[in-house]
């Protein structure tokens, strides 16, 4: 468990730093926000098309490995591997991470960008922690769940396409209004 937590901290540091940098870069480009939102929307649509299988981006399937990184079985080694893992895991997280970094770039404060990537890292951490707690049960579950992965990718791709279209057409605020109206019913 300690090594799993160290591994998670390693990749979380990278993702949170990316969030802070994206927000800072986004603030510098604030005067071009409308144009950049449309460009981001197009990129999000492209990633959505990739996830649905309508278009394949070969670069996202590239596997970059750091063979020289030795982690051993210590917490420090697991941290180093987690840190390296964040840089080489783009085939799995590239499209979703890009979208979140795009949202981080549109935030008005670095703390909001950091928060977005912290939540993203926590979402990645859950499967690793659950795996560390019960690898045997996890493998059985994953064996049954794996057949649904394509459907999940297609649904995620569809969601990205919808979000991208909202950005391209300058209608992303519709989403905020929708969730705001839901908030009244929940409270």
Image (cartoon, rainbow, N blue to C red):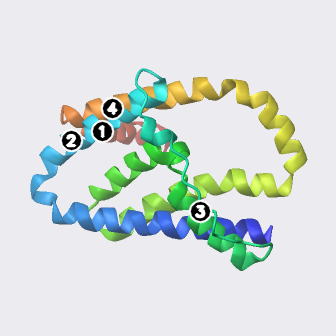
Q: Nearer the viewer, mark 3 or mark 1?
A: 3
Q: CA distance from mark 3 to mark 4?
A: 31 Å
Residue corresponding to mark 2: 39
Q: Which comes before the other along the chain, label 2 or label 3?
A: 2
Determine the residue located farthest toward the right in the rendered image. Answer: 136
Could you say where residue 165 lies in the image, as x and y percent from the top left? Answer: 27, 30
Residue corresponding to mark 4: 45
Could you say where residue 21 lies in the image, as x and y percent from the top left? Answer: 33, 67
Question: At 71% across and 55% down in the image, what residue appears?
Answer: 128
**Which disc is residue 43 wearing?**
1
Near-viewer residue (46 or 102): 46
Q: Which comes before the other along the chain, label 4 or label 2?
A: 2
What is the secondary structure assignment of the residue under circle 3?
loop
Question: At 82% across and 36% down in the image, what residue appears?
Answer: 141
Question: At 46% across and 41% down in the image, what residue appears?
Answer: 60
Determine the residue located farthest toward the top in the rendered image. Answer: 54
**Which disc is residue 66 wearing?**
3
Q: Where on the picture, by quarter, is residue 28?
A: bottom left
- Whether the residues at callouts 3 and 4 have beta carbons within 8 Å, the answer is no
What is the secondary structure assignment of the residue under circle 1?
helix
What is the secondary structure assignment of the residue under circle 2?
helix
Asked if residue 174 can be seen in this view, the reply is: no
- Whether the residues at callouts 3 and 1 have beta carbons within 8 Å, the answer is no
Asked if residue 58 can be seen in this view, the reply is: yes
Determine the residue located farthest toward the front in the rendered image. Answer: 68
- Whether the residues at callouts 2 and 1 have beta carbons within 8 Å, the answer is yes
Above or below residue 80? Residue 133 is above
């Amino acid at each position: 468990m300690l090594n799993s937590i160290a591994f998670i901290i390693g990749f979380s540091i990278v993702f949170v730093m990316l969030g802070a940098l994206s927000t800072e870069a986004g603030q510098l480009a604030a005067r071009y926000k409308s144009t950049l939102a449309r460009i981001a929307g197009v990129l999000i649509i492209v990633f959505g098309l990739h996830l649905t299988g309508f278009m394949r981006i070969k670069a996202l399937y590239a596997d970059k490995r750091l063979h020289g990184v030795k982690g051993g079985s210590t917490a420090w080694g697991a941290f180093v591997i987690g840190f390296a893992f964040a840089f080489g895991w783009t085939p799995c997280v590239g499209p979703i991470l890009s979208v979140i970094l795009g949202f981080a770039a549109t935030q008005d404060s670095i703390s909001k960008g950091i928060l977005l990537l912290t939540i993203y890292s926590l979402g990645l951490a859950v499967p690793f922690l659950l795996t560390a707690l019960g690898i045997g049960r996890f493998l059985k579950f994953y064996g049954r769940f794996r057949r649904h992965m394509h459907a999940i990718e297609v649904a995620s791709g569809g969601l990205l396409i919808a979000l991208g279209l909202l950005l391209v057409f300058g209608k992303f605020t519709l989403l905020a209004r929708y969730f705001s109206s839901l908030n009244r019913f929940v409270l």
